[in-house]
Amino acid sequence: MKHGKHLERRTFNQDRFEILIKRQKNGIATFNELTELDEIVNRDPEIREIVLEEMQDADNPKPPDDDQIQIIQKTVRKSFFEKIKAFINRLFINQGPQLNPAVIA
């Protein structure tokens, strides 16, 4: 029986590292677990390389996409007078149909 999955050889340290990282990210890791995680990273050169690569990627973020740039450029702050004008327009537009015609005439 062949399966599509390829077997992956993993060490105890690699499995324990993944478990401890998940607990750390979820915020439920104890001090002893964090100490164990630190020891694993310091002891195992393969895991240390993985951590260093992730830290380097975090230090050099990717530039934003064009969609994100356009969204940022579209949001323009209104000046104080524009805010007052918009408020007055909303005030009269929203209350216009609700006014009693006998009072207006």
Image (cartoon, helix red, strand yellow):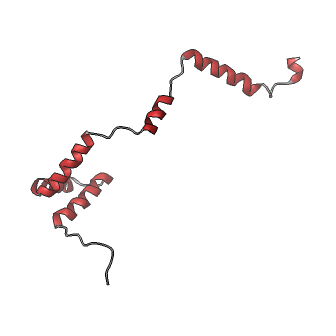
Name, please, the residue furthest toward the top: 81
Please say whether residue 7 is visible from this viewpoint.
Answer: yes
Q: Is residue 46 left or right of residue 88?
A: left
At x 87%, y 23%, the residue is: 101
Residue shown at the point (24%, 58%) measured from the top left: 20
Task: Report whether 10 appears left or right of 80.
Answer: left
Q: Residue at x 27, y 53 (%)?
A: 24
Q: Quadrant of residue 89?
A: top right
Can you say whether 52 is above or below 97 in the image? below
Can the viewer see residue 35? no
Classify residue 9 by image quadrant.
bottom left
In which quadrant of the rendered view does residue 23 lie?
A: bottom left
Which is more toward the observer, 97 or 3? 3
**Residue 81: image x %, image y %?**
58, 15
Q: Nearer the viewer, residue 66 or 43?
A: 66
Q: Is residue 43 above or below residue 70?
A: below
56 or 32: which is nearer to us?
56
Q: Quadrant of the C terminus?
A: top right
State the image coordinates of residue 5 (x, y, percent, origin top left): 31, 73
Image coordinates for residue 4, horizontal then vertical, percent: 33, 74
Instruction: Give coordinates of residue 64: x percent, y percent.
Output: 38, 38
